[in-house]
Image (spheres, rainbow, N blue to C red):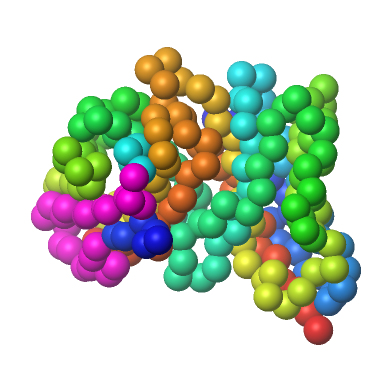
Amino acid sequence: KAGVTQTPRYLIKTRGQQVTLSCSPISGHRSVSWYQQTPGQGLQFLFEYFSETQRNKGNFPGRFSGRQFSNSRSEMNVSTLELGDSALYLCASSLELGGDTIYFGEGSWLTVV
Amino acid sequence: QQQVKQSPQSLIVQKGGISIINCAYENTAFDYFPWYQQFPGKGPALLIAIRPDVSEKKEGRFTISFNKSAKQFSLHIMDSQPGDSATYFCAASRRITGGGNKLTFGTGTQLKVEL
């Protein structure tokens, strides 16, 4: 059974640009969450999607957004990139909304220059 | 506000020894406490988890001890092996209105197991 798949794995963007990251959850999983991991702030919750609706949101500015499609795949977008947005962005999936067992992908490494 | 405090930041253990990582939480609404293991270049992988209705859970060489009154929980790795060298994160979560589940992570412990 394939795990959580994230694309692209690595990318470099310039300040002011925008970026879209993609996530395919484990087959059958309907809830997708996104986390940001940085050396300074650690792992922080961005948002959670279920049934194409954002159910929960972390303390991030509105430049961070996401969406979920009918096949449970999800994308997150960061607009007007700042240097501080450089991070590992992790997607996680669980079977249902509020599911305890959360599986992470390998992440997308974003570098903003 | 750091809701989950993890210590130590780094840990060196000899092969065959016991690795102990501690976490403390503040929010009494937390009702699920997982531990994740992360290798360089990989995403966190769920290792073991516990709910506050039990004081201990063991899976192979990994044991979680939970102290509800002290709001603390810890991970014990018995017979530590070089392959256990990784970063370990404790986390806590609570049910959110609307049915979601948001993990709050500790700051991580870099474990190195030496031969």
Q: Quadrant of residue A67?
A: top left
Q: Nearer the viewer, residue A89 or A50?
A: A50
Q: Is residue B43 above or below residue A73?
A: below
What are the residue bounds of the magenta stretch? A7-28
What residue is drawn where x is 66% and y is 19%? B28
Residue B31 in the image, given as x and y percentages of width and height: 63, 26
Q: Nearer the viewer, residue A24 or B85?
A: A24
Residue B13 in the image, given as x and y percentages of width and height: 82, 70
Residue B57 in the image, given as x and y percentages of width and height: 78, 42
Q: Is residue B54 above or below residue B48?
A: above
Q: Does residue A15 belong to the magenta stretch?
A: yes
Q: Quadrant of residue B17?
A: bottom right
What residue is drawn where x is 32% and y is 64%? A109
Q: Which residue is most to the right?
A: B17
Task: Answer yes or no: is residue B11 visible.
Answer: yes
Q: Quadrant of residue B90?
A: top right
Task: Answer yes or no: is residue A41 visible.
Answer: no
Residue A1 in the image, given as x and y percentages of width and height: 40, 61
What residue is drawn where x is 38% and y is 17%? B98
Q: Does residue B107 belong to the magenta stretch?
A: no
Report the quarter where the C terminus of chain A lies: bottom left
What residue is drawn where x is 46% and y is 20%? B96
Q: Which residue is most to the top?
A: B97
Q: In this rendering, would A66 be left or right of A43?
A: left
Q: In this rendering, would B1 be left or right of A57?
A: right
Q: In this rendering, would A46 be left or right of B56?
A: left
Q: Nearer the viewer, residue A63 or A4?
A: A4
